[in-house]
Image (tube, grey):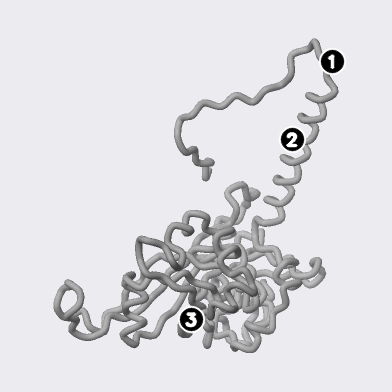
């Protein structure tokens, strides 16, 4: 991972434009070795991780099946076996570093937690779909993208805190469809939970250009929102410029339509209902 010394405050690309094959993939090189890149510090890596947490809202929750169960039908011998399942989360006040989770009591992850399992939340960074091209084949390699796991436990968020900090609104802004199973719904019993982070394991990319290892929880929690907001991951800056260009184009188009004489045809955007459309990932 490459961090230029004179970049604006924490604009942090995750790979160099140099076409160098990674020399260390899953570990950092020895301190005495020479490397083309400057490996980010633990604090810089914590900022990057918090940025990923801020940008994302879907992760994998991993738990462990308890011993023999009499309450559910599952294959024998599953006790002690880990299972990872996708789930929603949101980074909400007053503890944005501890992910907020809408827990459904009947879901496997939360049944395992209720039975005593520990839990981890794992996620990875996805570059914007319209990121700039790179001559380096490793720049956007999934193996070179940041990913990490948060190890901890889930605690219930008190109703008073839910109301005081608008937890429900914060969560539903990221996941509008989840309104159907918020607490008090008629489908399943659910409750607001928070993953209290106790340990952070980070893989920032290839080991010769990224920090790989544990991030102390006090460093994780000590990252400020300003640092999170000013950090830019690989591809983000180009996406921001593309969004601004699109906004300017829309504004110019709107202005042109308004300033047209009344007798001239106005611009109209016609769409046909063909169901959900997906942007190209090319």
Q: Secondary structure at mark 2?
A: helix
Q: Position of residue 272 (x, y in %)?
A: 51, 26
Q: CA distance from mark 2 to mark 3?
A: 44 Å
- Closer to the chain start, of discs 2 and 3, is 3
Q: Label 1 neighbourhood size at 10 Å, few (<14), some (14-19), many (20+)? A: few
Q: Which quadrant of the structure image shows residue 213?
A: bottom right
Q: Earlier in the sequence, mark 1 or mark 2?
A: 2
Picture disc at residue 250: 2
For mark 1, what is the residue? 261
Q: Position of residue 74 (x, y in %)?
A: 18, 72
Q: Nearer the viewer, residue 273 or 233?
A: 273
Q: Is residue 176 left or right of residue 9?
A: left
Task: Point out the tag, 3 or 1, that comes first from the N-terminus.
Answer: 3
Q: Disc 3 marks which residue?
A: 156
Q: CA distance from mark 3 to mark 1?
A: 61 Å
Q: Quadrant of the N terminus?
A: bottom right
Q: Residue at x 35, y 61 (%)?
A: 187
Q: CA distance from mark 1 to mark 2?
A: 19 Å
Is residue 269 shown left or right of residue 59? right
Q: Position of residue 21 (x, y in %)?
A: 55, 65
């Amino acid at each position: 991972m490459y961090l230029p010394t004179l970049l604006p405050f924490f604009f942090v690309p995750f790979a160099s434009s140099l076409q160098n094959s990674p020399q260390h993939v899953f570990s950092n090189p020895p301190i005495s070795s020479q490397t083309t890149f400057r490996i980010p510090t633990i604090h810089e890596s914590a900022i990057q991780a918090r940025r990923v947490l801020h940008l994302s809202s879907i992760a994998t929750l991993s738990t462990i099946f308890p011993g023999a169960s009499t309450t559910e039908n599952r294959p024998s011998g599953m006790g002690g076996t880990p299972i990872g399942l996708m789930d929603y989360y949101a980074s909400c006040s007053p503890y944005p570093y501890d992910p907020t989770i809408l827990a459904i009591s009947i879901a496997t992850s939360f049944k395992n937690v209720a039975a005593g399992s520990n839990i981890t939340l794992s996620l990875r960074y996805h570059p914007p779909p319209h990121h700039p091209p790179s001559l380096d084949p490793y720049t956007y390699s999934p193996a070179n993208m940041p990913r990490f796991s948060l190890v901890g436990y889930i605690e219930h968020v008190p109703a008073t805190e839910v109301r005081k900090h608008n937890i429900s609104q914060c969560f539903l802004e990221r996941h509008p469809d989840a309104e159907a199973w918020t607490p008090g719904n008629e489908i399943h019993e659910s409750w607001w939970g928070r993953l209290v982070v106790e340990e952070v394991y980070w893989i920032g990319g290839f080991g010769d250009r990224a920090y790989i290892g544990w991030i102390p929880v006090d460093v994780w929690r000590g990252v400020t929102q300003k640092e999170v907001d000013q950090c830019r991951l690989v591809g983000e800056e180009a996406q921001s410029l593309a969004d601004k260009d699109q906004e300017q184009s829309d504004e110019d188009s709107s202005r042109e339509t308004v300033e047209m004489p009344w007798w001239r045809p106005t611009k109209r955007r016609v769409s046909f209902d063909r169901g959900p459309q997906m942007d190209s990932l090319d």
